Amino acid sequence: MLVGNEEARLGFLKWLKAWKVGGKAALLVGPPGIGKTATVHAAVRELSYSIIELNASDIRTKDKLDRALGPSVYNQALIGKSLILLDEV
């Protein structure tokens, strides 16, 4: 359970529940330590999503992103409900 930043946390959860393929990505912004990554992990757990987490400082080009994610991004049947988290963007 995540406590605090209720408006932001609930806003993200509402956005994620309504998100459709082809929709816009979410960008969580704020100073370090306020719970951006924890919010994503809590939402993923609550909605029974799987998560693919990458650190953006390690993957900075489309080619590297394609290699890291592989075919899972393009084949919904393989990954079902998944969320891709690019941390430290």
Image: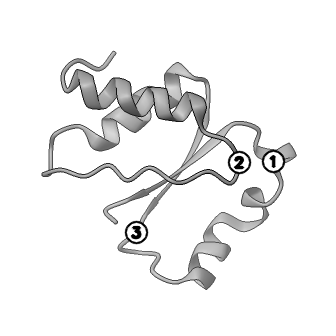
- Contact, CB < 8 Å: mark 1 with mark 2? yes
Nearer the observer: mark 3 or 2; the answer is 2
Judge whether 34 appears above or below 32 on screen: above
How far apart are labels 1 and 3 at the CA level?
Answer: 23 Å
Amino acid carrying label 1: it is Gln
Residue 56: image tag = 3
Earlier sequence position, callout 1 versus callout 2: 2
Q: Residues within 10 Å of mark 3 (few under 14, many from 20)?
A: some
Residue annotated with mark 2: 21
Which of the 4 image quadrants contains residue 6? top left
How far apart are labels 1 and 2 at the CA level?
Answer: 10 Å
Q: Position of residue 67 (x, y in %)?
A: 66, 75
Judge whether 31 appears above or below 44 on screen: below
Q: Position of residue 26 (x, y in %)?
A: 44, 49
Amino acid carrying label 2: it is Val
Which residue is located at x 58 percent, y 74 percent?
A: 65
Which residue is located at x 60 percent, y 38 percent?
A: 19
Q: Position of residue 4 (x, y in %)?
A: 18, 22
Which residue is located at x 37 percent, y 53 percent?
A: 27
In the displayed structure image, the side of residue 42 where residue 71 appears, left or right: right
Residue 76: image tag = 1
- Label 3 secondary element: loop
Amino acid carrying label 3: it is Ala
Q: Which residue is situated farthest in the right direction here?
A: 77
